[in-house]
Image (cartoon, rainbow, N blue to C red):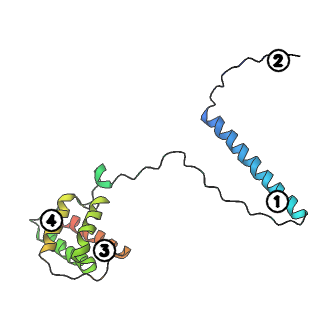
Amino acid sequence: MGFPKFSFTPAQPLPNDQLKRILEKLESIERELLLLKRRVAELEGKPVQPRPLRVPEPQTPISKPVPAKDVGMVLLPHVDVGNVRVIETLLDWVQFMLSKVGHEGFDDLVNYYVEIGWISDEVAEILRRYAKGMNVEGTQAYMLPEDHTKSLDYITRIQEAMR
């Protein structure tokens, strides 16, 4: 007795939407089967095993967010150091930040604001220069959310002063 002859045809790739529907159907069948198994176990008086959590694999690789400054979205790209109201507000803001994090945390804070696109490198340098001339002690190791909100308010006031 001989084996039947089969012709081999390479499988054609399925379109993504069709593959997605098949996977969804398989997951649905798997859920129904699990529910049936649990129901049978309950009827037989056996302990029911909790369903293990499955974390799906990400479909696309997770990428790091692009800093706002790299896409040109800076809230305060420059300051008018010839404007008295701007200077007063800058000095108040620097004093406020120093009173929170001190000189030890000031540079990290300013770098953070550059990273998230609130200020430019140019504005950061001006803030650092002003901070060097102030003798203010910090009261905490980091900024609280309401402190960042106040910093954002200072940025808005500086923008308004330059209009």
Q: Which residue is mark 2?
A: 4
| Of labels 1 and 3, the one closer to you | 1
**Mark 2–mark 4 distance (CA, rounded to whole Å):** 84 Å
**Mark 1–mark 3 distance (CA, rounded to whole Å):** 55 Å
Q: Which residue is mark 3?
A: 150
- Label 1–label 3 contact, CB within 8 A: no
Location of the N terminus by quadrant is top right
Q: Which residue is mark 4?
A: 126
**Mark 3–mark 4 distance (CA, rounded to whole Å):** 19 Å
- Label 3–label 2 contact, CB within 8 A: no
Q: Residue at x 25, y 61 (%)?
A: 119
Q: Which residue is mark 1?
A: 38
Mark nearer the N terminus (2 vs 1): 2
| Residue 132 percent across, percent down from the top left | 13, 73
Q: What residue occupies the far left of the structure in this picture?
A: 82
| Of labels 3 and 4, the one closer to you | 4
Label 2: few (<14), some (14–19) or many (≥20) C-alpha neighbours in 10 Å: few
Q: Amino acid at mark 3?
A: Lys
